[in-house]
Amino acid sequence: MEVINLPNYFKPDIPSPHYVYDYQSSIECMKQMVALQQNTFSFLIEGRKEVFADKTNITIENSNFLLMKMGTCLMTEKPPTTLENYRSILFFFSNKALLKFIQKNKIEHLKSCTNQSIYSFQYDDFLATFVQSLIQISKLETQMQSKLLELKFEELMTYLIETKGLDFIFSLLSNINSHTQHFNEIIEANKLNKLTINELAFLSNMSVSSFKREFEKQFKSSPSKWFQDQRLEYAAFMLRSNSKRPSDIYEEVGYENLSNFIQAFKNKFGITPKKYQLERTLITTF
């Protein structure tokens, strides 16, 4: 699958620390591999967006927008209907621009903050008006855009700090302390998500062969076997914890049909999901 580098995909040479693009598409994009070369606000206007990045998975409708840290992610974009376009105003900014803002405003580093790759914020009247101003700026010539976007970036960051706090700012600048910890967090966060080995390797910033070697080193198992075991354990948990039938959960744990799920479950636990649920119900009852 082709990797889309943003914002270079829209404009190959972007010397400016800020860039805005009015992105529209009538095509549904499923888990596109995206490499963000700059931090990015994705102001969703029409459609639905889902992003996997590191250990974070967020889905939003057009009542929310995203702030995404530069790096790799998997992105799904769905138009609202077959007759309408997906639309998002993308506002890119560099780490240099962020540092300049922090220094200018004498913002003190928080002693403790989260280390997220994606933040979701809800629109309010101010932010909705702000996005409309970005649309108008995107229509101007490049030099004028550059001057105005620097001011708009300060305006936006100042408003978000006042309304959302400082946590997100230093999360954007934070580095991963441990490669091994980062790798393990990605695996654990996505063990129930239907991601391929290629997609997980991409999120880990590795080749597939390097990913497999690292996986077997850390988890003492092949990726396919480990993920299957995790999903079957989760299926067993659901069967004994609630009244859902096997036919209700097989897709949720990554199986395309019920018969394959039943066979895999029987191979692991020695009995069918239905019998497993019945036995656990009887044990709980008595």
Image (cartoon, grey):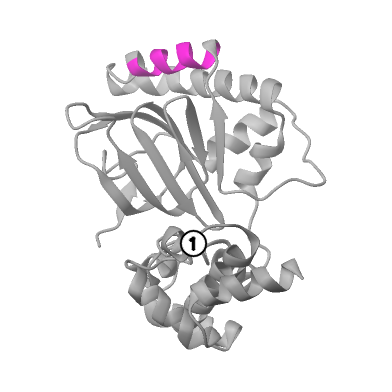
Q: Residue at x 41, y 64 (%)?
A: 195
Chief SS of the magenta region: helix
- 111 vs 197, nearest the viewer: 197
Residue 45 at x, y = what percent? Answer: 37, 24
Relative height, residue 270 to residue 120 (above, below):
below
Residue 42 visible? The answer is yes
- 91 vs 230, nearest the viewer: 230
Residue 216 at x, y = what percent? Answer: 52, 86
Relative height, residue 276 to residue 118 (above, below):
below
Look at the image and tell me in which quarter the C terminus lies: bottom right
Say which amino acid is labelled 1: Arg
User: Which stretch did the figure color magenta?
Assistant: 126-135
Is 129 in the magenta?
yes
- Where disc 1 sits, the SS reads loop
Is 62 in the magenta?
no
Q: Choose top left, top right, bottom left or bottom right for residue 185.
A: bottom right
Neighbourhood count class around disc 1 (C-alpha, 10 Å): few under 14, some 14–19, many 20 upward:
few
- 96 vs 92, nearest the viewer: 92
Residue 266 at x, y = what percent? Answer: 47, 84
Q: Residue at x 57, y 57 (%)?
A: 243
Query: Outermost residue toward the right?
Result: 111
Look at the image and tell me in which quarter the N terminus lies: bottom left
Residue 223 visible? The answer is no
Q: Residue at x 52, y 88 (%)?
A: 270
- Residue to which mark 1 is pinned: 245
